[in-house]
Amino acid sequence: EAGVAQSPRYKIIEKRQSVAFWCNPISGHATLYWYQQILGQGPKLLIQFQNNGVVDDSQLPKDRFSAERLKGVDSTLKIQPAKLEDSAVYLCASSLARTGGTGTEAFFGQGTRLTVV
Amino acid sequence: KQEVTQIPAALSVPEGENLVLNCSFTDSAIYNLQWFRQDPGKGLTSLLLIQSSQREQTSGRLNASLDKSSGRSTLYIAASQPGDSATYLCAVPNTGGFKTIFGAGTRLFVKA
């Protein structure tokens, strides 16, 4: 079974530039998550999709971050304009159903390491 | 509000030692708890998922226990090896149940 695919693996941009990350979840997984992991911290949920609908985006800085999941499969996360504090690893994960309530495991991609200079 | 704490933040042990990593959470009304491993520059690999009805789960040299009433979980690693060096993260659902909250992790270094 193929895992969660993310691209690019690394990205370096200047502040105020734009960047986009792509995620392809495990086939059949209805739930997709984007996490931000700052160095030395645990991952923080940015947005959670159930199929192509947003379930939770309470911690997404909506003035600069946006995400979409067209057709309930692949997803993109965009930052525009980037700030220095956006430097982090951006992790995509998927699960068959929502984690927590259904006890479903989440599977993670390798992440995209973003450096904003 | 669910908060997750992991102790210690970092740990260095000689090869062959048995060790225990600790995870505590503030809201004990959880459905499950998951332990992950993260290698430098990599994503997260799921190690063990414990349902709320279970008290422990085992996979090879790993054993995770869950005590919901006290808001604690431990990950026991037997006969540690240099290849076990990584960051170990625990995660639980938030209050309400449908968002996963992570601890900051324990960075483990096993010396050969």
Image: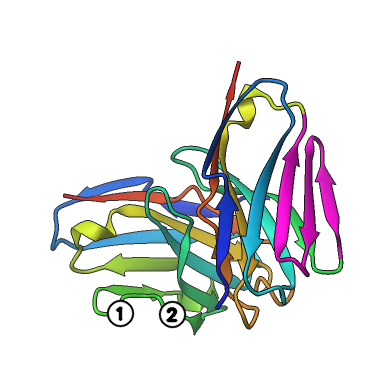
Q: Please, which chain is the residue tagged with disc 1 on?
A: A
Q: Are marks 1 and 2 on the same chain?
A: yes
Judging by the rendered image, the residue that carries numbered circle 1 is A62
The residue stretch that appears in magenta:
B54-78
The type of residue carrying mark 1 is Lys
> Can you see residue A104?
no
Considering only vertical position in the picture, is B16 above or below B60?
above
Q: CB atoms at circles 1 and 2 under 8 Å apart?
A: yes
Left or right: B20 as drawn, with respect to A55: right
Q: Please, which chain is the residue tagged with disc 2 on?
A: A
Residue B4 picture quarter:
bottom right
- Going from N to C along the chain, the mark reached first, 1 or 2, is 2
Residue A115 badge? none
Residue B31 picture quarter:
bottom right
Out of A5 and B90, give the one closest to the viewer: B90
> Can you see residue A13?
yes
The secondary structure type at the circle numbered 2 is loop
Q: Quadrant of the C terminus of chain B?
A: top right
Q: Does the segment drawn in magenta span residue A25?
A: no
